[in-house]
Image (cartoon, rainbow, N blue to C red):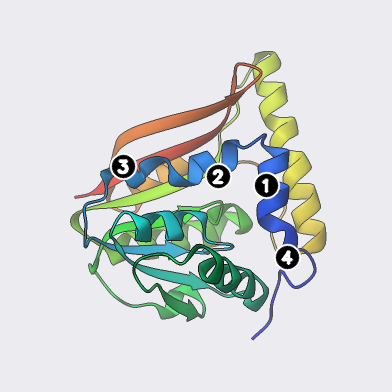
Amino acid sequence: MKDGYWLVGFQYELTGYLYSLGRIPKCKSAMLKHLKPNDKVLVAGVGHGTEAIEASKLGADVTAVDLSQTMLNQFRKRIAKENPPKEIRVIHDDIFNVKDTEQYDMVIANFFLNVFSKTRVVEVANHLGTLAKPGGYFVVGEFVLPEKNGWRGVLQRVNWYFAITFYSATTEAVFHPVWDYPALVEGSGCKIQEIEYFKIFNTNLYWSILGKKI
């Protein structure tokens, strides 16, 4: 199984923290406030597992999926260090091989959809939507869609293109503009309930989007 993050996966969490001045970790955990004890949670592209471990600490039953063995190695080290109260189910596989249709109270895709092409990202978002229970949640944390005009739009584009240039050069991430993530959430069969923004220099750079499965 090919590991697209073998080169840079070991530093992924630290880089994201430093690059965003701590906003990315906060974005990843923002919508966990909607969880109840014993909710079933799926984290797609779990990486180092910030939100997976926090969800476990809140009493959720967590399933974590990643195709990168490098990422999962780091995630398991973090589990051993933080010792979450509930065992986390870890799946080393492509997300499309997870076919637990309508089994999860919350499906989370944080900084995961941004690695895909225009066609593929729609397919992935739609598949993730099928995994949420009716009335359950689909959460996406990502880079914001840039404003069309003004200096904030410029800053938002610089923030995104610097990141995607690095990761498209070092991983299998596809170089592309920022996708319309609220539209992807709604296209998957979910209605937007809440959006929380994370700012630097009074500019929205990241957002956590909460959709509810219709």
Left or right: where 196 falls relative to 129: right
Describe the element under mark 1 as helix, strand or loop. helix
Q: Earlier in the sequence, mark 3 or mark 1?
A: 1
Residue at (59% x, 52% y) in the render:
114
Tell me the quarter of the picture where residue 2 sits: bottom right
Instruction: Name which quarter of the figure residue 22 lies in.
Output: top right
The answer to which of marks 4 and 1 sits earlier in the sequence is 4
Residue 166 position, x and y percent, is 80, 51
Front residue (pair 82, 197): 82
Badge 2: residue crowd in 10 Å (few <14, some 14–19, many ≥20): some
As drawn, the label of residue 25 is: 2
Task: Tell me if I can see residue 180 in this picture.
Answer: no
Is label 3 in contact with label 2 (beta carbons under 8 Å)?
no
The answer to which of marks 3 and 4 sits earlier in the sequence is 4
Q: Residues within 10 Å of mark 3 (few under 14, many from 20)?
A: few
Q: Which of marks 3 and 2 is nearer the N terminus?
A: 2
State the residue position of label 3. 33
Q: Which amino acid does label 2 sit on?
A: Pro
Of residue 126 and residue 166, the one placed in the foreground of this image is 166
Q: Name the residue under label 4.
A: 10
Total numbered labels placed on residues in the image: 4
Placement of 152 over or under 167, stated as above or below: above
- Which labelled disc corresponds to residue 70? none
SS state under label 2: helix
Q: Is mark 4 on a helix, strand or loop?
A: helix
User: Disc 2 or 1, which lies upstream in sequence?
Assistant: 1
Q: Is mark 3 on a helix, strand or loop?
A: helix
Residue annotated with mark 1: 16
Question: 166 above or below 10?
Answer: above
Name the residue: 76% across, 57% down.
168
Three-letter amino acid code of the residue under disc 3: Lys
Q: In whole angstroms, how far apart are the C-alphas of marks 4 and 1?
A: 12 Å
